[in-house]
């Protein structure tokens, strides 16, 4: 049951690497001193350099916040507070409050758009079929730049890479939005963070500054149309789109932003939510997308809001009933299987239904020749079921037809920031795709088979040109 938090984060980023320097990523952290571990104080030191002690595995286990019961293994998710030096003083710090060390990959600079437009004027509007949505609205590129620049200047996490910070500030200080001039020592990991996070704002700059005709290829929704404002929903879970452009006639062009093809989108948020609101689109046909809809009802989802927290319940309901073929007498509560498997690796402590599900899973994994899933059973259950459901959806032509119809009905545009030229010389170019003009591929979670929580999502999808 691995994750990248707690003790698994220490093993991945710190074990055997001596003293490791990183930075505080959280806005406010609670620390204590080694001499008084139970006495806490709060520090607001985001971006401050931290030197984590060089510890052995045995020493790290002594810093667990909740040691396991006798004869029980230590969970990969076990929380730890490690001794570290901050501004010349030693503290015990929750490892989850620390950024990834530089040598292990890109640092977490907190560049999500919600952080970069903090302080913008907020309004509540009806947007894309959703009422009373809190949004930031920008009527000019200069207005957007002013807000973003202010937040970049105050972002202390960026101080660990001054050239990257300066490159960003210079870009948002000028008016040449079609190119960012990278300073020396800005590597591809930082440039990719620009693409992943800031590209969502850059599409606004390109359109508001009148560069849409030259810097957007593919299906350009702005040709011959006048834009009034750039709208960013402030709720990160808003299901409509990442952003929208208000046209002079009062209509909106919704946009989903990605770096290249980007991360896959949630099937639950963007497809099943539509089905829950408009079940007539299924036309009572027995398809795999209908099985997902029926499963949502079985686990108590009555509206699209309920989908936000029910994705695993639906995966287990469909997985137990339709992938493994277990009826309600064999497994009365399918989600109990997830709860059993998550709580312990000891099969003797599972419910009777959990043990029956375990046996059925082992048989299914063997039949699928999936040795990795079988080797990691029970932690592999969520991933295995998600991949099998995705496989079934992709093979079901009627389900694909229904889902493409849903995505076409939503009529949004996907803006893919092309990273090849961005990484090479800073040139910014978008390729746009209309939702109804693409091929569709359903993807089971990209989480590893040792992650029962499937932290990278369960069922996602990609829209692409050409063959999926």
Image (tube, rainbow, N blue to C red):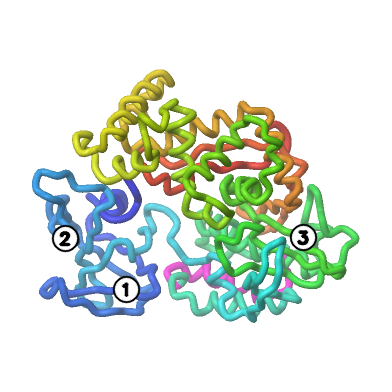
Left or right of residue 193: residue 227: right
Left or right of residue 288: residue 416: right
- The disc placed on residue 63 is 2
Residue 127, given in percent of the width and then of the height, sits at 71, 66
Residue 165: say if magenta.
yes
Inspect this view and state whether residue 11 appears.
Answer: yes
Inspect this view and state whether residue 171 appears.
Answer: no
Please tell me whether residue 129 is drawn above or below residue 168 in the rendered image: above
Please name whichever residue, 356 or 184, is drawn nearer the observer in this view of the structure: 356
Query: Start and end of the magenta stretch?
Result: 159-177
Identity of the residue drawn at 22% across and 63% down? 81
Where does label 3 land, which residue? 253
Q: Nearer the viewer, mark 1 or mark 3?
A: 3
Residue 317, given in percent of the width and then of the height, sits at 45, 38
Element at badge 3? strand
Query: Image quadrant of residue 118?
Result: bottom right
Q: Nearer the viewer, mark 3 or mark 2?
A: 3
Q: Main secondary structure of the magenta part?
A: helix
Going from N to C along the chain, the mark reached first, 3 or 2, is 2
| Label 3: few (<14), some (14–19) or many (≥20) C-alpha neighbours in 10 Å | some
Give the CA distance from mark 2 to mark 1.
17 Å
Give the CA distance from mark 3 to mark 2.
52 Å
Where does label 1 land, which residue? 29
| Label 1: few (<14), some (14–19) or many (≥20) C-alpha neighbours in 10 Å | some
Q: Label 3 near label 1: C-beta < 8 Å?
A: no
């Amino acid at each position: 049951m691995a994750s990248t938090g707690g003790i698994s984060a220490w093993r991945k980023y710190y074990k055997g690497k001596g003293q490791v320097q990183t930075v505080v990523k959280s806005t406010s952290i609670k620390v204590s001193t080694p001499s008084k571990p139970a006495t806490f104080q709060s520090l607001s030191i985001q971006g401050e350099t931290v030197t984590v002690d060089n510890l052995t595995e045995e020493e790290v286990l002594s810093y667990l916040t909740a040691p396991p019961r006798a004869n029980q293994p230590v969970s990969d998710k076990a929380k730890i507070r490690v001794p570290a030096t901050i501004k010349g003083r030693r503290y015990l710090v929750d490892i989850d409050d620390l950024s990834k060390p530089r040598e292990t990959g890109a640092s977490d600079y907190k560049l999500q758009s919600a952080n970069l437009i903090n302080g913008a004027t907020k309004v509540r509007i009806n947007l894309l079929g959703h009422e009373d949505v809190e949004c930031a609205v920008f009527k000019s590129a200069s207005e957007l730049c002013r807000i973003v620049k202010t937040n970049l200047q105050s972002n202390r996490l960026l101080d660990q890479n001054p050239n990257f910070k300066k490159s960003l500030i210079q870009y948002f200080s000028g008016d040449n939005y079609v190119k960012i001039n990278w300073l020396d020592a800005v590597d591809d990991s930082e440039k990719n963070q620009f693409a992943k996070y800031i590209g969502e704002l850059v599409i606004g700059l390109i359109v508001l500054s009148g560069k849409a005709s030259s810097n957007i290829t593919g299906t350009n929704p702005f040709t011959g149309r006048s834009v009034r404002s750039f709208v960013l929903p402030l709720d990160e879970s808003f299901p409509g789109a990442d952003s929208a452009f208000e046209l002079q006639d009062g209509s909106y062009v919704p946009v989903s932003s990605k770096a290249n093809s980007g991360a896959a989108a949630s099937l639950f948020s963007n497809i099943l939510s539509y089905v829950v609101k408009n079940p007539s689109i299924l036309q009572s046909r027995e398809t795999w997308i209908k099985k997902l809809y029926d499963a949502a009802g079985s686990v108590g989802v009555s509206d699209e809001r309920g989908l936000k927290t029910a994705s695993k319940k639906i995966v287990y309901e469909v997985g137990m009933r339709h992938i493994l073929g277990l009826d309600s007498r064999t497994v009365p509560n399918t989600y109990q299987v997830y709860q059993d498997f998550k709580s312990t690796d000891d099969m003797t402590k599972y419910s009777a239904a959990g043990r029956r599900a375990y046996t059925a899973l082992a048989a299914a994994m063997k039949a699928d020749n999936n040795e990795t899933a079988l080797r990691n059973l029970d932690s592999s259950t969520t991933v295995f079921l998600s991949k099998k459901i995705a496989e079934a959806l992709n093979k079901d032509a009627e389900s694909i037809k229904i889902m493409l119809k849903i995505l076409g009905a939503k009529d949004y545009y996907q803006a893919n920031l092309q990273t090849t030229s961005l990484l090479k010389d800073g040139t910014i170019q978008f390729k746009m795709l209309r939702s109804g003009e693409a091929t569709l591929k359903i993807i089971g979670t990209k989480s590893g088979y040792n992650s029962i929580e499937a932290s990278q999502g369960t069922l996602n999808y990609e829209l692409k040109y050409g063959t999926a």
